[in-house]
Amino acid sequence: MQCLGIDIGGSGIKGAIVDVATGQFISERLRIPTPLPATPQAVALATAELVRQFGWQGPIGCGFPAVIVHGVAKTAANIDESWIGTDVSAILAEVTGCPCFVINDADAAGVAEMRFGCGKDRMGSVIVLTLGTGIGSGMFIDGVLYPNSELGHLRLKAGPAEHYASAAVRKNEALDWQVWAKRLNKFFTQVERLFSPELIIIGGGVSRKHDKFFPYLKVQAELLPAELRNQAGIIGAACLAVERLTAC
């Protein structure tokens, strides 16, 4: 079955049509900038434009940068705070004319990596961390997702860890890879102290350059770069949309 997957991020809204049985894109990946300010109306209209470019009619899965409970945003990370309390699934369904399933963006990426990437068939405790504009997280035990973990909001240096150690911070502050890795190590120390994962998977676009910073990371868990990278959020959202919307 096919489904349109969309990944709404702090800087861009990306999408592709996905074969949910294989996790493969069956269309080109399209991207449009996330509008500023990233208010509900502005982001919804931009998402509708992306859907129009695909000429899509059918279920849509959407990864969204917030804690999502039954389609409603409970927080707002790297997006306008006016989203808090908004039924994201309802507003996207209204503007696109398609049934929409919405999930936390890092959870969507984690699901894809656990099904089709380096987490496939892995049991035990696994944490998928997406390093990008912020730091997203997906937590799994024996392949089952614990949703909305948002580990990037752990406190570090008097603020959220993602304000200190995200990939965007590395770029904006022109940090070399070793200096940035030292910041990541402080974050990983907290994660391991709290959850003792057996495997940590590093996702996001920066994972394709893992050879530049992995040698400086000091973790107890097994450490692997994600295989699906920036495609993961799109794939995971599409797969879950088919399952959840079909079950309704």
Image (cartoon, rainbow, N blue to C red):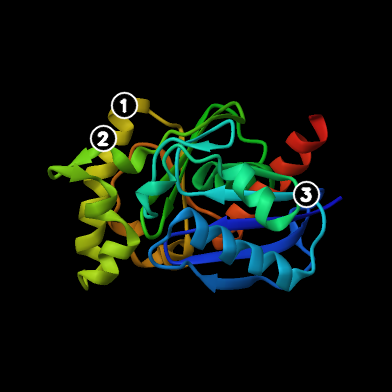
Say if 7 sits above or below 239 in the image. below
Q: Nearer the viewer, mark 3 or mark 2?
A: 3
Q: Which residue is mark 1?
A: 194
Q: Position of residue 45 (x, y in %)?
A: 58, 63
Q: Which residue is mark 3?
A: 59
Say if 171 sits above or below 195 in the image. below
Density class for disc 1 (Cα within 10 Å; few <14, some 14-19, many ≥20) is: few
Q: Residue at x 37, y 28 (%)?
A: 196
Apparent side of residue 167 relative to residue 47 in the rendered image (left or right): left
- Circles 3 and 2: CB distance less than 8 Å? no
Q: Position of residue 201 (x, y in %)?
A: 48, 46
Residue 190 numbered tag: 2
For the residues marked 2 and 1, what is the alpha-carbon distance in whole angstroms?
Answer: 6 Å
Apparent side of residue 30 relative to residue 218 in the rendered image (left or right): right
Say if 225 sits above or below 99 in the image. below
Dot 1 or dot 3, earlier in sequence: 3
Q: Secondary structure at mark 1?
A: helix
The amino acid marked with disc number 3 is Pro
For the residues marked 1 and 3, what is the alpha-carbon distance in whole angstroms?
Answer: 37 Å
- Circles 2 and 1: CB distance less than 8 Å? yes
The amino acid marked with disc number 1 is Leu
Residue 174 in view here: yes
Quadrant holding the C terminus:
top right
Q: Position of residue 234 (x, y in %)?
A: 63, 56
